[in-house]
Amino acid sequence: MKIPLSPRLRVCCGFVFPGERVADVGTDHGYLGIWLLQQGLASSVIASDVVPGPLSAAKRNAEKFGCAHLMEFYLSDGVQSIPRDFDTLVCAGMGADTMVSILSAAPWLQDRRYRLILQCQSKRPMLRRYLSDNGWRITEESVVRDGRFLYTVMEVYYEPGHPLTPGQCYFPPALLENPALELPEFYRRVTDNLKYAIDAQGDHAPAQLRQAYNELWNDPDLQWLKEATK
Ligand SMILES: C[S@@+](CC[C@H](N)C(=O)[O-])C[C@H]1O[C@@H](n2cnc3c(N)ncnc32)[C@H](O)[C@@H]1O
């Protein structure tokens, strides 16, 4: 029996390299890991959650879909109580505050042997600012439509020396590496939201917000995104 996977989680899975050992932190139902194992993409999966109920559901689903022998389950706040022998860490469906607290509590992750796949539900610019300020580099980022929402999925390595400007925290260059069909709409939404926030705050709008908007609106490399949504 194949597990039905949302477009959002499918894009996360698309970042996994064949044979990788994956840690799915905040696994909830466990679907991502189960799907990776069913496809023969991951070689093993560590599934963890900070809440016992979801972790039990993940275990039940792993049994039901015949993957339990390739999965390990941990009750853990972030990566605090999971083994460190994995290649890629996936955190999906969480907000920036949670992701930042998970990463800040684990300096051992700041090592080129680990790769992060992050699908952040809220405050993405804040997450990108944190990553940039702490030596993490977003090497690729994809936009995905799921229902009426546009999400992004980031591939991240520890590679200091690639700071993001204020505008790039809203729309990083990594989005242009492999542009999704939804990219022009995403650009439009980001710039519209910035403009709305600036107009709403008038003279009190933070300089960083204005700088971000001006950068994105005037960047010659991004003009095609504007044209595409006219
Ligand atoms: C909205 S669900 C997302 C589930 C799945 N990753 C997905 O994207 O569909 C978020 C899950 O993260 C778990 N979670 C929240 N904070 C966490 C933390 N600090 N460490 C581990 N898991 C956490 C929650 O218990 C919940 O099961």
Image (spheres, helix red, strand yellow):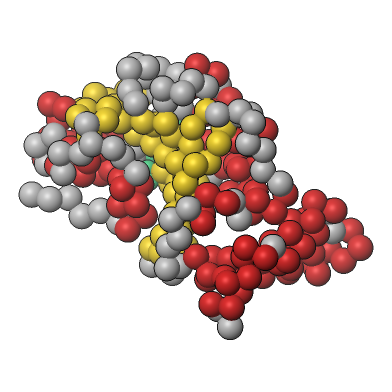
Q: Residue 113 falls in which quadrant of the image? A: top left
Is residue 31 visible from the viewing direction of this image?
yes
Q: Residue 179 falls in which quadrant of the image? A: bottom left
Decide if residue 89 is on the left or right side of residue 100: left
| View quadrant of ligand 1 | top left
Which one is nearer the viewer's eye here, 134 or 202? 134
Q: Position of residue 115 (x, y in %)?
A: 42, 31
Q: Position of residue 42 (x, y in %)?
A: 22, 34
Instruction: Give the residue drawn at x 54%, y 65%.
Output: 186
Instruction: Give the residue drawn at x 25%, y 53%.
Output: 5
Decide if residue 155 is on the left or right side of residue 212: left
84 in relation to 149, above or below: above
Which one is nearer the viewer's eye here, 127 or 114? 114
Q: Quadrant of the C terminus?
A: bottom right
Instruction: Give the residue drawn at x 34%, y 44%.
Output: 15
Is residue 54 visible from the viewing direction of this image?
no
